[in-house]
Amino acid sequence: MKIKRLLSVYIGITISASVVQAQSDLVTFTGLGRVYINSNALRGAGVEGDTTSKKRATNGYTLFDLGINVSPNENLKASVILRARNNFGGFYGDGSSLNIRQFRVEGLLGKILKYQIGDIDLGLTPYTLYNFEEIYHDYESDLFKIRRDIVAYENFNFGNKWRLQGLDAKTTLKFANGIDKLRLNAFGTRIKRANYATFEPDRLLYGGRAQVVQSKFFEVGGNITGISDVAGTVRDSVMQFSNLVYTGDFKASYELEKVEFNVFGELGASNTSFKNDKQKYSVSQDDYFYDGGARVKVKPAAWTLGVEASYREVGAQFLSPGAQTRRINDFAQSALFDKYHNLEYDRRQTLYDRYTNEGLYNQSIRAGLMNFLPEYNNITPYGTATPNRKGLTARVSLKDEEKIIQLDGAYEMVTEVIGEGTPELRDFTGIRGGLQLAANKLLKFKRSLTLTAGGRTEKTARGGMLGVDLNSTLLDFGLTVEVFKSFDLIGGYKALTAKGNEYLTYRDPYTGAPTGFNDYHVNSTENIVGAGARYRFNNRAFFTVNYQWLTYENKIVEGDNSRNYNLDELFLNYTLIF
């Protein structure tokens, strides 16, 4: 009955909106429809003779997101996204749901101030409010990217912004002399709701940015973000948390006929405090960061060459939850085949899970530093704002005007600012980069033929009694061939190899300071091979079918293959965007 009532409301809203649309142009519609089916099988040495673990699974759903946008005048717009979803195997409303995916009101006050209220996407700089990518995948195959895009859409990962609920306001003031323009931005959101059963207080995130654009040659900005527990919602036995991050950034540019120079940087500090008025206890810590560099772009003939170098130092106690919260929870258990080998082993996350499993991702900003698995990213596990890091980053890029070749590479040489649990410092070395080649343009083919190749390698080392020696390598290859008009064959290969040891750090949930260490060993390989086909009805609708093979080998115990397994998947997807 609940589903029927919800469906009646949904139909009523849709019909009402359609009537309004027929009468005027006040209402527009946007949306997304998707049919998603996947069938998986678990095989290999780890499940041979296994009589209790689940070894096959078929899942899927049909969903439709309808966006209704109402604009009674040019200064006001209200929008809502209604979602209807039916899980695979559900009939006559069984397994169906109807809910509101997004609600937002936006407009313009006095032709000066733009505002948004409701579900909003916010981001500032990499050190203040920034939803960073958890692993390098810039050059992965379209076959993997299709799955990753679905996960990103379901978790509201639109670029490097966070989906939050609150108010955002912006304005731009233009000047006749002295400076070109002044941009102002302020926002306020609630990132945690009070729950007295679990001692959780109301927690607010707020901040803003002021940017002065002097001209196309120079601009400077100031940023601030703050997190505070609301007084009166904090239990007497719980510490009240507050954090303030304030930074300044600048960019200076100079252009010649074929050369462009840029100098850029950001620096700032954080203050974190915990207090309990009843117990008359308080603790506060401050730390800093600075990050600056230079970039040169050269445009000889039809090519553009870019070279960049920067240096950063981020203090060990620098805390910026809006920039350091991880997008993925490395220790979340995958729902697909969560146990194997007669339920003896937990099946830990793999590369495959990270781009296919929607439930592993974090949708809220965390006050402290989350734990992570070092083989996936040990240099910047909390983004560029990762604390206790200092060192050099160099980048190079090359592309042509006809977009035949695009390549880039980056090198990082970083060390710790202070030792953790030992006087010795960790040294980090990383190389990443990739190539995209439009071979059809090079060979004068009429149809698309695109090759991609990318990779990242990291090495972590530390001497002394608590020595560290960890190496990891990530590889990506992709091929897309347009066989007939709008019909593509796609293939991809992805691999991760990790070997060595590290120390996982356990931190105080209040101060973030290390409280313990766990010796972590890894010796594993993950190989994923995929092949499939895609038909593009137009630039807004496509159907794809692909098959993927994951081979996981855990060689931590020599001669023991009981943890090894293969995971196969058949995946079908139809997506329509309008």
Image: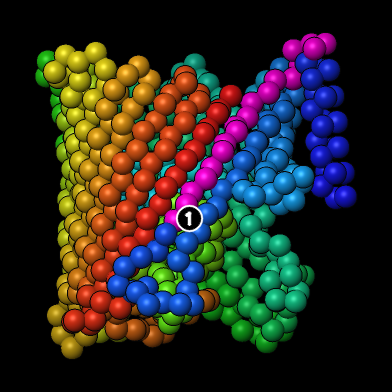
Q: Residue shown at 26%/73% (left/top)?
A: 554
Q: Residue shown at 55%/29% (left/top)?
A: 576
Asked if residue 227 lies left or right of residue 519, the reply is: right
Q: Main secondary structure of the magenta part?
A: strand
Asked if residue 65 lies left or right of residue 413, the reply is: right
Q: Residues within 10 Å of mark 1 (few under 14, many from 20)?
A: some
Q: Residue shown at 26%/17% (left/top)?
A: 447
Q: Specify whether residue 371 is in view.
A: no
**Relative image position of residue 32 (x, y in whole percent):** 60, 32
**Relative image position of residue 491 (x, y in whole percent):** 28, 39
**Relative image position of residue 451 (x, y in whole percent):** 21, 33
Q: Quadrant of residue 363?
A: bottom right
Which element type, helix, strand or loop, lies under badge 1?
loop
Q: Check the image and report above or below for 250 versus 386.
A: above
**Residue 500 vs residue 188, the one in the foreground:** 500
Q: Residue 23 magenta-drawn?
A: yes
**Relative image position of residue 550 (x, y in whole percent):** 32, 57
**Residue 408 vs residue 23, the one in the foreground:** 23
Q: Which residue is mark 1?
A: 357
Q: Residue shown at 50%/59% (left/top)?
A: 57
Q: Residue 399 magenta-drawn?
A: no
The quadrant of the picture occupied by the C terminus is top right
Q: Residue furthest left?
A: 300
Span highlighted in magenta in the image: 22-40
Task: Name the kind of residue labelled 1 in the image.
Answer: Asn
